[in-house]
Each structure stands twice: as C-alpha cells, then as structure tokens.
Amino acid sequence: MQQKVVVVGAGLCGTLLALRLAQRGFQVEVYERRADMRKTNMSAGRSINLALSDRGMRGLRLAGLESDILPLIIPMLGRKIYPREGNAQFMPYSGRDDEWINSVSRGGLNVLLLDKAEGTGKIAFYFETECLDVDFAHKSMRVRSAQTKEVRVVDADVFFGTDGAGSAIRQTMLSESARLRFNFSLQYLTTGYKELEIPAGQGRTFQLDKNALHIWPRHGFMIIALPNLDGSFTVTLFLQIAGNPGFESLRSDTEIRHFFTEYFPDLTELMPDVLADFRANPTSSLGTVKCYPWQVNGTFLLLGDAAHAIVPFYGQGMNASFEDVVVLDGLIDKFGPAWAKVFDEFQTVRKVDADAIADLAVENENEMRDATADPVFQLKRKIELQLEQNYPDYFSKYSLVTFREDITYHDAMVKGRKQDDILMAYARAAQSMENVDLKDVLQRLKALQ
Ligand code: FAD
C-alpha cells in the first residue's frame, strides 16, 4: 500500500524535501502555517536574500533545478570591505576562478521550489494550516486552519519536521523530553539584526559593485549588503541589542541618524529611507538551536532549522538544510523506505556536521565584523589566495566549508582551524607579502596531515 508522507513547513528545506520525495514516487502532503507566498506579499524585513553556495547547489541539482536557479542568482566573487578610514578593498572568496557564492532572493527561491513541487502532481499543499503538536504513539498531528479555526487530526506513516527554528514538532519532543531523553539548547547572541535597503539607482542600476558581498566592519558591529536582481541591495545591520551603540540606545530620530552618519557616512548617502526603514523593520534576535535526538520511533524526523538553526555569519543555514535533503536522499537509496534505519543513520551522520557548522558560524561573526579590518587577517587572506592560485590541493577554511561539498562540515572545521592557526601566526610574523615564502608556508600546512 502507498505510504502517506507528511512534510510540516513549506519553507526552503520543506519544499525541496517534498519535491525530492515526490520525484522518488511518494505521495506527499505539505502543511504550511503561512498563506501561499505565490498569492500574497512576503513580509518585509526578514532576510530577503541569502548566500547560496556549493552545498545548497548540490541539493538543487539533486532535484534537477540547476538551470532553473541560474536566472535567480547574482554571483558574489568576494567581500568588499569598507574600513572606517581609508579605501575600500576587495577580497576574493577564493584564489580559484570557479569558486564564488551567490545572492538569491529567499522568496524567489521558495516560489521556484513550490512551483516545481506542485508540478510533480504528487503533492497536496495545505497552506494556512498550522501544526499544533504531534502524537508520537498514534503517528498523528493536530493542525489548525487559519481560515476556519477548525482543528483536525492528520495521520501518516511518516512525518518530516521542516517547520523552522521554532518547530512545533520539536516543541512536542521537548514537552516529552524525559521519556525521549531529548536534549535541547537555544543559545542567543547578544547581537541582533535589522534589515534595511539600498534602493536601485536610475534605470535599475546597482549603486555598488553588483558582484560582491559588501561589509562595513566597525569593531563590535557591522553592516553587510547583498545584491538583488532589481538593482537594490538588502542591507543588514548587526549590532548589540543592549549597550551603546546598541539597538536599545537608538531611540530618537536624531540618535538613529547620528549613528549612521557617524559610522557609515558614505553608505548612508545611498540609503535615503534609512530612518523610515529602521523604524518600520523589526529588530530580530540571533541564536543557535542544538538538539538530539532528531527522530522519534522511526516516524518523526526533524531537518533543516528545526533540527539545527544557526546564526547567519557563515551563510550556511539554508545550504546545510539543503545538504540534509541530499544526505537523507542517499540513505533512502541505501535502505529504501525503512524509515527507522534511515532516520537513525541520518541523525548519527548529520549531527556532528550540524554542530560543526553551528560553531563555525558563531566564530565567523568575529571574522566578518572585526578581523576583516585587521591587517594581520588581511595578510593571511592574501597568503591563502596565493596558495589557492598556485597549489590546486590547497583550500582555505572558508573554501573547505563553502566550496567543497565532498568534505563534511566537521572535517572542514577540523582541518580549517589547524590551517588558520598556522597561517595567522605566519602572517603576524611576516607582516607583509614580501616576507612570505609560499613554499615554506605550504610545507608547514602539509605537516598537518
Ligand atoms: P524556514 O525557512 O524557516 O521554513 C520553515 C517553514 O515552516 C516556514 O515556511 C514556516 O512558516 C513554517 N512553519 C513554522 N511553524 C509551522 C507550524 N507549526 N506548522 C506549519 N508550518 C510551520 N542561510 C544560508 O545558507 N545563507 C545565508 O546567507 C543566510 N542568511 C541568513 C540571514 C538571516 C538574517 C537569517 C535569519 C538566516 C539566514 N540563513 C542563511 C539561514 C536560512 O534562512 C535558514 O537556514 C533556512 O531558511 C532554513 O530553512 P527551513 O526550511 O529549515 O526553515
């Protein structure tokens, strides 16, 4: 008999997963709390665009979407750094010509996935239908329709919880934590964020270099900007919530204006609506969710942010969620729909990688916000770029994490951290590129293996 498969949450991970399961022949039901985003306006001010890189691309490729995604992305070849004083500097992401990351609209990508998923004819979508909780013993969940307020019970053979960082399925696991021996932590950063915008110039032109991720590092806080297809840039201010400067100390119009003109004078000129945007858009928190186990009874499995929400400083949350789908798909290849085995293997192999990228993402806040303005770090990046240009076997930590879908996050972290220690010490001693002997550096790095 045909199995009934339910996916909870039609965000990025859930729609890719549903699409892939339908491609494999499963009949899928998808329950999504929000309205169908193809028929309503996306709410503004919540991570409008994202950096898509190789691990995420691999997930899209698995579902046959590699050419569909191309019109939606803008390559970002490196970071453009704007110090408080002095000239802007471009730092490529890699020394190799074929390695870059891509800016993609969250809404555009989600719509593509929804269209493709619907196009399979094997998926029933229930929008504006929120999962309230699940019943592990009876293989069911309660859902409530936003329109009718009716609550009903949905049964299935298997449930995938892709309902994001605030997952209702995970919440039920937490409420039965003693019985399930379910561990959970949510670690907030003291940094929060707010989205702003650089509008397009005349004739939809880009007011900054289109093919870069722009960073204004300011020791302890920063602004970043990613390009959108319409010529605008989505700008994100990452700032302490408390303290000065901090979101809580930016209350009056004068305080807000002064903050921007004091720390970001050139950028502020490109944002005529900065005050209105600052007032209109929410200040949001950032945190890391770690939990385990991710599955119950071989019937319920968490994936994506529901299992491992991470802070955005490595640009990997969505990429990791898409990689979850790839890993799960490989296990279905191996074991078939023997869900207990598939889920058990999935959480065993994937947890260590989810923890690795979670920790790397927290560390990378410092790199983006402070180190990018540090001359020793800048020299270290120059050495790495030259190594990548001259030695095909060398990959920086950033490249291992971002461009090497054949290496796990955990292995990338372990190798990358060791390389970083050596390179930072070398750069500190060398002080300038003239004193760098690339062969010597490479030998030191090779000695690690
Ligand atoms: P989500 O995209 O959050 O989707 C969850 C879905 O479930 C939503 O549609 C929601 O409405 C639905 N839902 C929730 N609760 C219920 C319920 N009870 N019942 C039914 N439906 C429900 N990642 C990158 O790879 N690169 C980046 O550059 C990047 N930048 C980011 C910047 C910011 C500021 C933030 C906050 C995140 C960023 N991320 C980035 C992370 C990325 O957004 C997430 O990792 C990704 O969205 C996870 O996908 P998901 O499907 O698991 O969760």
Image (cartoon, rainbow, N blue to C red):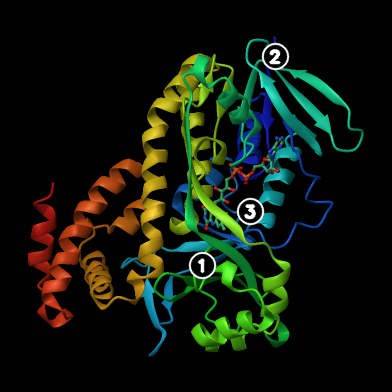
Taking 18 as reference, is 41 left or right?
A: right
Taking 330 as reference, is 271 left or right?
A: right
| Label 3 vs 1, first from the N-terminus | 3
Report the amino acid beneath label 1: Leu
Q: Nearer the viewer, residue 303 or 255?
A: 255
Report the amino acid beneath label 2: Gln
Q: Can you identify the residue that label 3 sits on? A: 68
Rendering coords of residue 321 (x, y %): 52, 42
Residue drawn at x 80%, y 45% is 36
Counting the numbered discs, the total is 3
Rendering coords of residue 342 (x, y %): 48, 20
Circle 3 crowding by C-alpha within 10 Å: few under 14, some 14–19, many from 20: some
* Rendered position, 214 above or below 304: below
Closer to us: mark 3 or mark 2? Answer: 2
Q: Quadrant of the N terminus?
A: top right
Q: Can you identify the residue that label 1 sits on? A: 239
Q: Can you identify the residue that label 2 sits on? A: 2
Rendering coords of residue 313 (x, y %): 45, 58
* Rendered position, 255 above or below 412: below
